[in-house]
Image (cartoon, grey):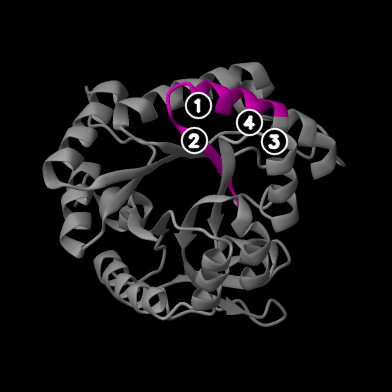
Amino acid sequence: MKLSVSTYSFDQYLRTGQMTQLDCIQKAKELGFEGIEFVDLLPPEGVSKEEYAKSLRAECEKVGIAVSNFTFSADFLNGCNGDTKAEIERVKKQIDLASLLGAVSVRHDTTIGYQKNVHPFESFDAVLPVLADACREVTEYAAALGIKTMTENHGYFSQDSDRVEKLVTAVNHKNFGLLTDMGNFLCADEKPEVAVGRTAPYAFYAHAKDFYIKDGNGMNPGEGYFRSRGGAYLKGAIIGHGNVPVFQCLQALKNAGFDGWLAIEFEGMEDALTGIRIGLDNLKKYLSLLD
């Protein structure tokens, strides 16, 4: 597996202006990563996203690091004021940006689910045909540009392993697969090792992520924690410090034949650079011990 880092991991520094996405490229290289995943494009004022994508690509080429993936949000049920066709066209423009960026794959969301005041009882299966058709149209467009597309187990409504599996099989296109995030399954109260084992055959890309978990029947642990869909308390952790069985998840990926990009997505409260560095060290140790 090739090791990458998501710019989301540098969010502490990006939000305060201490770093830009251009700075993240050099830092990722210094830390020892082979690739970098860009989450959205954050150009400075007065610079178009098209020009910024080109500058990021040029900087990656200059320092010798690959653009492993481009990640952005999408919602084929609620985006563009509920106009699914318009949302598909917006996503296609994001694919164009990915091409300028030099990304060979993109990850987009599918939906957070219908708003309760619009369709209060719509199940995932009920909206699956709409989501599958939208993802298929997008991936056909991306395939012509040499870009694979993926969705991620992300956003509660589209987070369960059986739901993302249903979506990939419904889209039924060789250019469409999954970004399997081992930590995110906890948000849907699934055991990560079981969920990764189920979804690994469809994985085009993977996120290494760790969380601390507290029983939802107890007191709120305080700042930094958020709730899973079923009410457990979760908080981002350095890889290897939390409760996600990272090694077992990596083994499940390897058992399924996955040998693509594995990107760290750190969202803990520790200093981001420290968290990324320690997480990378632990991840390398785990990978060296896989059967």
Mark in front: 4 vs 3:
3
In the rendered image, residue 40, in percent from the top left (x then y), is placed at 39, 38
How far is mark 3 from mark 1, CA to CA?
Answer: 14 Å
Of helix, strand and loop, which one carries label 2? strand
Q: Which mark is residue 135?
A: 4
Disc 1: which residue: 143
Q: How many marks?
A: 4
138 drawn magenta = yes
> At 62% across and 23% down in the image, what residue appears?
137
Q: Which residues are magenta?
A: 133-153
> At 20% across and 41% down in the image, what residue appears?
60
Of the numbered discs 4 and 3, the one sitting upstream in the chain is: 4
In the rendered image, residue 17, in percent from the top left (x then y), is placed at 22, 47
Left or right? Give the position of 130 relative to 64: right
Disc 3: which residue: 172
248 or 279: nearer the viewer: 248
Q: Do tag 2 and tag 1 residues touch (Cβ < 8 Å)?
A: yes
Of helix, strand and loop, which one carries label 3? loop
141 drawn magenta = yes
Circle 1 crowding by C-alpha within 10 Å: few under 14, some 14–19, many from 20: some
Q: Do tag 4 and tag 3 residues touch (Cβ < 8 Å)?
A: no
